[in-house]
Image (tube, rainbow, N blue to C red):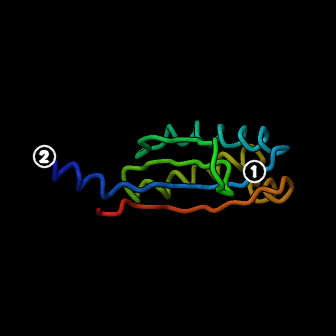
Amino acid sequence: MKQERLSNQSERIYRVDKFIVPDHAREEFLEKVQATHQLLKKQSGFLQDFVLEQASGPGEFNIVTMVEWNSIESIEPARAAVMALHQEMKFNPQELFTRLGIKADLGNYKRVGI
């Protein structure tokens, strides 16, 4: 049973996005994140998410979002749904980042088997 659970966990994929968000951009940025995450929670394969704000420490990224998916196959349909939502909202993330001076480091991660 334990091995089966560990095997299932090894298939999970984690979308981790790290952002440098200036103070003046925080409210508008978080509004967009909230809308996006509300949609993600409804997608097949969604397991959990976190939106984190740096509380202390020297790191340069002050907001981090994480979504856990049950497998890599869940990513593409979710990405398509997000793109459709953004189009419906007339929202262009790159325009927002440029206009507000937000820097992003985006990626998918998997568990390390240690």
How many callouts does the rendering have?
A: 2
Reading the image, the residue beneath label 1 is: 21
In the rendered structure, the answer to whether residue 38 lies left or right of residue 92 reads left
Q: Residue at x 72, y 37 (%)?
A: 31
Q: Residue at x 64, y 50 (%)?
A: 84
Query: Residue 10: which disc?
Result: none
Q: Amino acid at mark 2?
A: Met
Q: In the picture, residue 51 is in which quadrant?
A: top right
Residue 103: x and y in percent read 74, 60
Between 83 and 109, the one lying in front of the other is: 109
Give the spatial CA distance, label 1 vs label 2.
43 Å
Residue 13: x and y in percent read 41, 56
- Label 1 sits on a secondary structure element that is loop
Circle 1 or circle 2, nearest the eye: 1
Image quadrant where one finds the C terminus: bottom left
Q: Amino acid at mark 1?
A: Val
In the rendered structure, the answer to whether residue 69 lies left or right of residue 100 reads left
**Residue ranking furthest to the front:** 57
Residue 18: x and y in percent read 62, 55
- 10 in relation to 23, above or below: below
Q: Residue at x 30, y 58 (%)?
A: 10
Reading the image, the residue beneath label 2 is: 1
How packed is label 1: few (under 14 Cα within 10 Å), some, or many (20 or more)?
many
- Label 2 sits on a secondary structure element that is loop
Of pointers 1 and 2, the one earlier in the residue sequence = 2
Do the residues under discs 1 and 2 have CB atoms within 8 angstroms? Answer: no
